[in-house]
Image: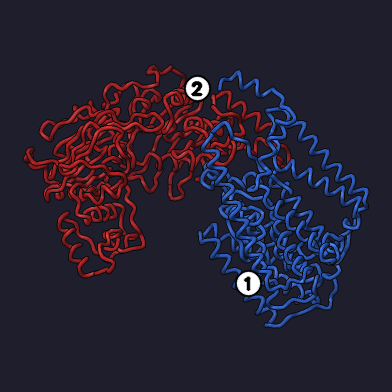
Amino acid sequence: MSADTLDDKQVGTLSVVGTLRSARQSLRPQRAGVVYALVLLVVILVAATTVMGLPSYLSSTNISNILGQLSPVAILAVFMTVVLISGNFDLSVASVAALAAALALKTIDTIGTVPAILLALAVGAVVGTANAILVQKIGVNAFIVTLGAMTAVRGIVLIVLNGESTTAKSQALVQIDSVVFGLPWWIGVILGLGLLAIAASRFRQARSAAALPLDGFFVALIIAGILMLVVSFGAPELLTQPLPVWIMVVVTVAVSLGLRFLVPGRKLYAVGSNPEAARLAGINVNFYKMAPFILSGVAAAGVGLIYAGRFNSVDPNALSGTELTVIAAAILGGTSLFGGAGYVGKSVLGTVILFTLTNGFNMLNLGSNYQYVVQGVVLIAASAVYTVASRARKRQKAAAPETTTVPSVPAEVK
Amino acid sequence: MRGAVVTVSPPAPRHDTAESPTLEIRNITKTYPGGTQALRGVTLSLRPGVVHGLVGANGAGKSTLIKIIAGAERPTTGDLKWLGTSADWRRPADAQSAGVAVVHQQSPVVPAMSVLENVYLGNETATLWKPQARLIEFTALCKRVAFEIDPDTIVAELSVGDRQMVSILRALAQNPALILLDEPTASISPAERAGVLGAARTLAATGVAVVFVSHFLNEVMQICDEVSILRDGQLVDAFDHDAMSVERMVAGIVGTRLHAVEASRPTHEVGEVVLDVRELRSTMMNSAISLQVRRGEIVGIAGLLGSGRTSLLKAIFGADRRASGEVIVNGQPIAASPQAAVDGGVALVPEDRMRQGLIGDWEIWRNVSLADSGDLSRRFGVLDVARERELAAKAQRDLGIVASSIDTAVKDLSGGNAQKVVFAKWIYKTHHVLLLDEPTAGVDVAGKADLIKLIRELATQGIGILVVLSEFEELLSLADRIVVLRHGAIEGDLSADAVSVAELTASVGGLA
């Protein structure tokens, strides 16, 4: 290509259709599969509940119910995704959350609320730092390190609790967990319109050929904007939610935007994709490999506090097995286990799918016996779809190289 | 200097030439799907009991010929005759079962297994593992190559040279009629070379046809009965041990090749010292290395594979944690980490661009700003995508990167264009020193000319450049000064005007 034709392209303006075409990439099954799966699942459940004359699946009560249940796991999934993007793995999150919950409830009556919370978070940071040092500095495999941490920390929970469940007189954590915040419907409308306005401005920019082509972020903005408007007008009561749900929303949005728009986010993806190239480009690989473990540890401790507040009681087996649900959610969201790829928003959608399945089984009275089988099958099927779809895409690309190269840029915030 | 003293009996007087050849290669050509003609009619005859040397520069067609002999590639035209009957090998297993064994420069061994297990790996004639019988066979094999090793030693504990011997034993365990040694001494220490070279001679003495491929011409002189020289896919010269001379070999290898680079190097100003390396030591280096590069100067490092050239660049860049010594850039000492090097104004264009220089799945624009994203951002570390993309578009224009847009993933680019992206990553950052490791490897002629021009331009801007290049014509036309590196030590510091390709070839090969 000569420099002249390039210049023409640079200043050129694309047609509306041409501009939109670039967003199509993000709608392919291997990119947006988790969205289609969720839509399909919801449609099936709505149809089933309607036919069987049960209360509608999409009732505000049921949705609030699901959101409340999934928020702790979704928060864990957000940070698990960060760890996975960095090219690592963290199995210790559920144990850390249980330890944080146990410590907080054990100490809150004697040392006070704030010290107990700080103690719990500090313990999360310590475990996260230990994981980070063992994996990055000593070089032990992350799977083994965090498997060991998961077991050992669970052991500490048993020691702390002396094998029995515990509770606290202080109601501080319970109150924090159940604080409810509500947005007036008109703020929802403004937010929805704002999201659509941002999408429109992205579209306008993208019409210049030199600008970043439209991607999943654009699609996500539109979907989020429309959903916001529908909720604000149709079910404004959904804008009132307890604190953990709001924490989940804020954490998801903040981490997504950080990964997409901040320099550390870009560097994290670089380190996860090709650590050697990142190192030789002068990026501090140690930092970007270690920080996610510490973040994950602190976040897990935070989730432990939410758990402690929810039940005001914690038993030695609290949350055990949750780490697998969290990883399953991230994989359902299309996060790569090899690092360098993944989107926080999609992992949260993966969590929504898993909890919708559970909730649907309960509503339809199908018995929880089948639930794990279905969850397992869904997880494997999702991975198979991602793998097959991306392989088909590669073949197609190999058949017609260069010309079909459609720009791919991370989608974010679904 | 001649490496270590190699105690190898000189080749026996000429063998009976009437003896029927083990493998006859007749008028072989090989054209790759891309149109590259790697071999243009090569005829060779490999006879039992003869060590046949195969030499040639990079890209001469050696590797293709080796692959054809090993059954990994099929010739486009021409034929192979194995023990008098025509052979059509479709896969390496065919050649192997016929009796061809190959020892590569770094043959894969299984580190966790014992020497004995490695030697008989993949050679299980019976399902039952009989240690006693194997042990007797093993002792016989060791005797054949005059090598002593405890069969129970775990391979992970062996030196690289001993591992190479294990590979040779493994090849031998297949009881081959022809054994191909592909640069068997390139990655091992001088002291261990003697064993490998001796093994090649002893093998020939037992009636095996041996092919010895090497860049080390002194080794070829020592052990080969006859030599064939490949250049540009053709056999340009062949002679036996009595007619062997340094001049004849070097002349054959170098020839008068046409190349894309204009020979005249524009004169340019050379300023003060910008890179000062003092007493740098690392694992692949046998001695402490000190060198200086001035502003605007292009210093070439000439050395063979395994001479420590890549280790040297990595050590300067701080990418080798075990390195020690001092690196001073523009008067400032640089801590030993890539991050400190980048901050201090040093850039590295690594040898393996896809693994070390680029993120394949990323688009051109994100790769261009990989090293720069911090400087290109707005306040509070917010990425300025518009500026990054402007820079990438500028890079695409400036360097002539052929791609449909800056949103093309770099893994879809050709070698030359991908390499330009690696350069683009650095050239818009203010820096002082550029370290280039084989910047033109795998790049076509047009791309090469572009890159050479770019490197010269960067030097003109006052950057000090240290470049490793295996193509000596290119190196000589590009560099002002040449540092010869052999076995991890500096063996010479020459003005590029004062040395010819032939002299350089002889020098790195240990003949000068």
Residue at (79% x, 55% y) in the render: A249
How are the residues colored?
by chain
Can you say which quadrant of the picture contains the N terminus of chain B? top left
For this rendering, which residue is in front, B328 or A55?
A55
**Marks 2 and 1: which is nearer the front?**
1
Q: Chain of mark 2?
A: B
Can you say which quadrant of the picture contains the C terminus of chain B? top left
Q: Is residue A330 shown above or below A190?
A: below
- Labelled disc at residue A153: 1
Chain (blue): A
In this orientation, does residue A40 appear?
yes
Local SS, label 2: helix
Look at the image and give the colour of chain B.
red
Name which residue type carries label 1: Val
Q: Along the horizontal axis of the image, is B361 left or right of B321?
A: right
Q: Along the horizontal axis of the image, is A273 left or right of A349?
A: left
Residue receiving disc 2: B457
